[in-house]
Amino acid sequence: MNFIRLNHNPSALSRGITFILYFAFLSTSLAATRVQNSALQVKQKTVIHQVNIVGFKFVPERLEVAVGDRVTWTNNDIAPHSVIISQSNTAKKGKEITPRLEPKQSFSFQVTDGINYQCGIHPSMQGKIIIQSVDKR
Ligand SMILES: [Cu+2]
C-alpha cells in the first residue's frame, strides 16, 4: 500500500525538486548581488588623494573629492608644516586637520565637507578641498 501511494504522488516530488532548484538559483543570485555591492564599497573606500607639501606650497592647492574620500598630506619640504581650517570657515576656523608634520611625515584625513585650509605655521600657505558632484565621477 505504501509503495502504491508513493507511485501515485510523482507531482509532489517534482514540485519539491522544482522548489529546491528555484531556491538554489535564488541564493546564487543573491550571493552575486552581495559580491557586487561589496566590490562597490571597496572601490569607494580606496579613493585616496595625495597633497604634496613642497616649496612652502600645497600641491595641488585645489583638490576635488567626493564625500568619504581620504586626503593624505605628505611633508616633502625642509620645514615643518601643519594643516588647519582657514579663516573663511568662521565656525571651524583654526581647527586642526593634521598635527604638526615634520619633513617626510604624512597624515590622512577623511573628507566630510568642502574646506579652505592653510598651514598652521605659515598662514600664507593656502589650500582648498571642493566636494565634486556624484555624477561627475
Ligand atoms: Cu607651513
Image (cartoon, rainbow, N blue to C red):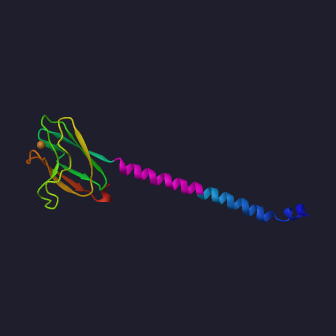
The quadrant of the rendering that contains the N terminus is bottom right
Q: In x, y percent, where is residue 135? A: 32, 59
Q: Is residue 7 above or below residue 56?
A: below
**In the drawing, does residue 105 fall left or right of residue 35?**
left
**In the drawing, does residue 80 fall left or right of residue 40?**
left
The answer to if 36 sits in the magenta stretch is yes
- 132 or 117: which is nearer to us? 117
The answer to if 116 sits in the magenta stretch is no
The quadrant of the rendering that contains the C terminus is bottom left
**In the drawing, does residue 88 fall left or right of residue 27?**
left
Q: In x, y percent, where is residue 98? A: 20, 46
- 97 or 8: which is nearer to us? 97
Q: In which of the image's four quarters is ligand 1 placed?
A: top left
Q: In x, y percent, where is residue 96? A: 18, 50
Q: In x, y percent, where is residue 82? A: 16, 44
What's the magenta bit mostly, secondary-structure-wise?
helix
Residue shown at 11% from the left, 46% from the top: 125
**In the drawing, does residue 18 fall left or right of residue 101?**
right
Where are the magenta residues, as a range?
27-46
